[in-house]
Amino acid sequence: MTDGEDTAVVSRENVELAKRFYEALASGDMVARLESPDALRAAGSVVGPMADPELEVDMVGPEYISEPTVYRGMDGYIEAWRDWLEPYESYRVESEEDIDAGDKVVQLVRQVGRTRQG
């Protein structure tokens, strides 16, 4: 295999990992998923082996502008989403495209939510 073929294989594997990560954690109604211990366990069994223990999540949005919040590890990932989703009754992330960007994957998504206050 040439270096170019090695890169293509790794890149294709990264896209597949990103798709599995999305399916396990972000597909469907995320509010309902985070309220279900069974759904969280199932997602954790898929994602846990893929995630680096040093995973850091920075949430970016109006409520975080004055003081950025950094979450660490898989527990931090779940906590970040719980914080983010707190005002929502339902919230979906719809995957539109996975772009192979060499050693990275760019996921284009549409976010759809309904707040608790209507």
Image (cartoon, rainbow, N blue to C red):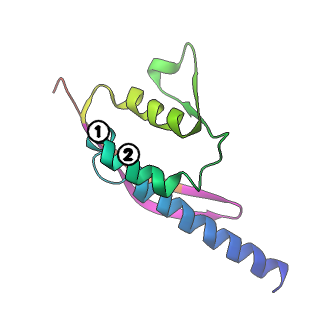
Mark 2, other Cα within 10 Å: few <14 / some 14–19 / many ≥20: some
What is the quadrant of residue 14 in the picture? bottom right
On the rendered structure, is 79 left or right of 14? Answer: left
Residue at image point 53% right, 18% down: 65
Residue at image point 67% right, 69% down: 11
Give, as a three-letter code, the residue at label 1: Val
Most extreme residue toward the right, as rendered? 3
Most extreme residue toward the left, as rendered? 118
Q: How much space separates mark 2 and mark 1, taking CA atoms?
A: 11 Å
Give, as a three-letter code, the residue at label 2: Leu
Give the image location of residue 54, x and y in percent.
67, 39
Q: Which residue is mark 1?
A: 31
What is the quadrant of residue 13 in the picture? bottom right
On the rendered structure, is 39 left or right of 50? Answer: left
Q: Which residue is mark 2?
A: 40
Span colored in magenta: 90-106
Circle on res. 66: none
Name the residue nearer the viewer: 58 or 54.
Answer: 54
Query: Of tags 2 and 1, which is closer to the observer?
Result: 2
Mark 1, other Cα within 10 Å: few <14 / some 14–19 / many ≥20: many
Q: Name the element at disc 2.
A: helix
On the rendered structure, is 99 left or right of 23? Answer: right
* Residue 61 visible (yes or no): yes
